[in-house]
Amino acid sequence: MRSMVVVGGGHAGAEVVVGLRKAGFEGRVVLVADEDRIPYQRPLLSKSYLSGGTGPDELAIRPERTYADNDIELVLGTRVDSIDRGARRVVLSDGRSLDYEALALAPGGRPRLLPVLAQHGPLDNVHYLRTVADADRLREQWSAGRRLVVIGGGYIGLEVAASARAMGLEVTVVEALPRVLARVTGEVMSSFYAEVHRERGVDLLTGVSVVDAVVVNGAVREMELSDGSWLRCDLVVVGVGLVPNTELAAEAGLAVDDGIVVDEFGVTSDPSIVAAGDCARYPSAQLGGDLVRVESVSNAVEQARVVARSMVGKPVAHTGVPWFWSDQYELKLQMVGLSRDFDDVVVRGDVTERSFSAFYLREGRVIAADVVSRPVDFALARQLVARGQVLERELLSDVDVPLKQLLVTTAVER
Ligand SMILES: Cc1cc2nc3c(=O)[nH]c(=O)nc-3n(C[C@H](O)[C@H](O)[C@H](O)COP(=O)(O)OP(=O)(O)OC[C@H]3O[C@@H](n4cnc5c(N)ncnc54)[C@H](O)[C@@H]3O)c2cc1C
């Protein structure tokens, strides 16, 4: 029987297996995943799962019966250890092997370790957040009044800080760059979120990094910062980025460069192997073909749909514009597009009212937008960005001119 194998049970892997059925594939479909649970929604881990609003049974991306109904074999708690490309076969950690006609790699990534802490080996009160197991371990130490130090002022760090404040922990955030969210957004959004966190009682330190740690009985008690100050802590969460899981692909001789390199159809340097999700580096239509690796659910899902089609020989190119969201306190931040290399920022709405959008433009063209608590703006921003629409900044910033009108009346340029 024809057989498709998918490696990794995250958002991408879960979508590939369903996508294969949607694309009409009737042969064998096997999902091999090293975590011991059906694919689940990772974004909830730093949000409602940590602040207590979501339980472990509410995390699944799809109910278990969807896999059974679609005749998808789930091999959980098992790793794919190697790929024999010549034989078109993967070898699993339990010693079994599976033959494939096409293979999808969706192994995601793992948290980047912080050397100054990692050099001590595993520490009881130092946490990274990628899996339910990580979140459960963190929740065991998560109680009101305890001193939490979050290292890294990116999305995950700030979401953890917000969830911790909701649970009454004392929170300090340490960010090495001069502003939070610096890698993903512009200054308007960074200073807005810095102010929100400070208002909620977070001690937010920017432009400083951890240079030393006092470890007693397997736990960090105090950390020295680059400005010479010391921070005492009961627990630490490190959120300093992701390392893509490329080893399996690299060992099989596939092209790897800060991600598994794929073309616009999600195909790797081996035509029978595709890759999708946080692990994949693909040519971005929006960036004129530059290779990007995007860490977001929307990107993982869209790429997964693309690679499922490639696996069954019905290719469609990946053209989607990635979007992302972040929940902190009562605020919903939604972002679309890749804001790198913008030359102008237009703010629409009222920052002090906590309902505004920042549009990023390059040569007058809307390339990305960050939207705070304005869902209608976001829906329209997605269309503006997808079209790469050219807009006058005066019109864009004028809240009396509905965005919808701009979308309709402005000529589409691309
Ligand atoms: C705390 C947190 C909050 C987030 N919040 C948001 C958000 O608000 N919005 C958003 O868009 N994105 C968010 N993200 C990012 C989003 O979750 C990822 O972009 C998405 O999960 C990527 O899916 P993936 O399938 O590529 O990889 P993953 O979800 O990492 O799944 C890959 C799976 O493959 C497994 N695996 C790896 N190697 C092997 C192997 N050899 N054999 C078998 N299995 C293997 C891994 O263990 C993992 O289970 C968040 C991520 C985290 C961690």
Image (cartoon, rainbow, N blue to C red):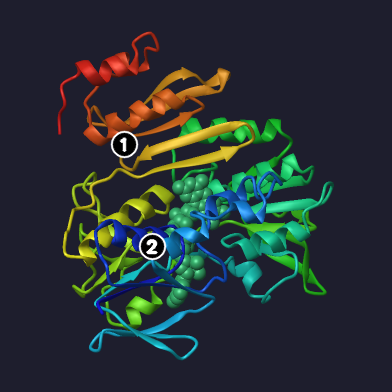
Classify the position of the C terminus by image quarter. top left
Find the residue positioned furthest to the front: 69
Please name whichever residue, 64 or 185, is drawn nearer the observer in this view of the structure. 64
Q: Say which amino acid is labelled 2.
A: Asn
274 versus 50 height, above or below: below
Nearer the camera: disc 1 or disc 2 = 2
Q: Amino acid at mark 1?
A: Phe
Residue 70, disc: 2
Marks 1 and 2: CB-CB under 8 Å? no
The residue lying at 79 percent from left, 42 percent from top is: 168
- Image point (21%, 63%), residue name: 310
Left or right of 397 on screen, residue 384: left
Which percent across, then down, holds residue 49? 65, 50
Q: Position of residue 279 (x, y in %)?
A: 38, 64
Res. 154 visible in picture: no
Q: Position of residue 252 (x, y in %)?
A: 31, 83
| Image-based side of 11 in relation to 158, left or right | left
Describe residue 214's horizontal placement relative to residue 273 as left or right: right
Secondary structure at badge 2 equals: loop
> Disc 1 to disc 2, how far (Cα)?
44 Å
| 85, 189: nearer the viewer | 85
Tell me if mark 1 has few (under 14), some (14-19) or many (20+) residues whose alpha carbon lies within 10 angstroms of its own. some
Q: Of label 1 and label 2, which has the lower sequence position?
A: 2
Q: Name the residue that disc number 1 marks.
A: 342
Q: Please give the label number shown on residue 57.
A: none
Question: Residue 67 placed where, x, y %?
Answer: 44, 63
